[in-house]
Image (cartoon, helix red, strand yellow):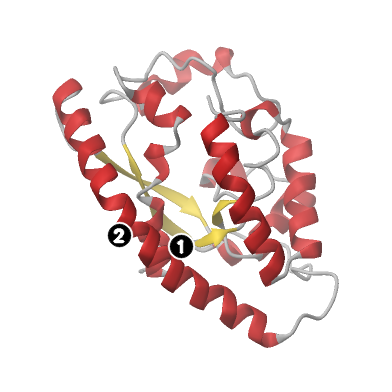
Amino acid sequence: MQVTSRVLVSREPAVSRVVPQWWHGAKRLTDIILGSLLLLIALPVIAIAALAIVLVDRGSPFYAQDRVGQDGKRFRMYKLRTMVHGAHAMRDDILHLNEVEGPVFKIRNDPRLHAIGAFLRRSSIDELPNLFNVVLGSMSLVGPRPPLPSEVAHYSAAARRRLTVPQGITCLWQINGRSDVSFEEWIQLDNRYIDSWSPWSDLAILMKTIPAVIRKDGAH
């Protein structure tokens, strides 16, 4: 995938120890094989959700957004659209409703959601197109969630460290409360993941993600 620009990232090592080189290869191989399998399984769900979005809010059911990946590389992240057309232009009018401290913007009951947007978010169905990013290589199955460039512009050195590893669909944040976790705790979880990363920790996170999604832990 074409890289459009790069955000400055701290050159602090991604991990505090030396890890076997094959671990990185195993991670990418897992992303390709398991990501492709999951994408095939998810395609019918994506298709049904896309049709539902078109019926309740005409226009493209998909949404591509600039995000910041590993080493500050920008890429287009794909999702199912959960907001009405023109939602981005409404952001300044509802900034006062932000419920999370730090350089992130999250609202429990976002007024910009269309008729089924809340359901798609709570069920995490809106994130299924992220699997395209995984297969293409701009994201991993497991890793810190890729932030917006506007958020990275306000990152501290500790927060920028999360950009030294592949960004992912799920990580410790997703299985420990998601939006119910403060931004400071979020960064601590991401740094803990970086310090303890291994192929086996990725597998454990993937297995814990399934019940977390079913329970809708912290999904707003």
Name the residue: 52% across, 60% down. Answer: 141
Q: Position of residue 40 (x, y in %)?
A: 30, 59
Q: Is residue 4 above or below residue 173?
A: below
Q: Do the numbered discs 2 and 1 sit on residues whose CB atoms are within 8 Å?
A: no
Q: Amino acid at mark 2?
A: Leu
- Residue corresponding to mark 2: 40
Name the residue: 16% across, 30% down. Answer: 54
Alpha-carbon span between mark 2 and mark 1: 31 Å
Name the residue: 44% across, 32% down. Answer: 123
Q: Give 38 or 51, whichever is nearer the viewer.
A: 38
Q: Position of residue 6 (x, y in %)?
A: 52, 63
Asked where in the image residue 72 lies, by quadrant, the reply is bottom right
| Circle 2 Cα neighbour tier, 10 Å, few/some/many (<14 / 14–19 / ≥20) | few
Name the residue: 40% across, 22% down. Answer: 118
Q: Is residue 219 above or below residue 195?
A: above
* Residue 3 visible to an observer of this rendering: no
* Residue 155 visible to an observer of this rendering: yes
Which mark lies nearer to you, 2 or 1? 2
Q: Position of residue 138 (x, y in %)?
A: 45, 65
Which of the two discs, 2 and 1, labels the residue nearer the N terminus?
Answer: 1
- Residue corresponding to mark 1: 5
Q: Report the disc number at residue 198.
A: none
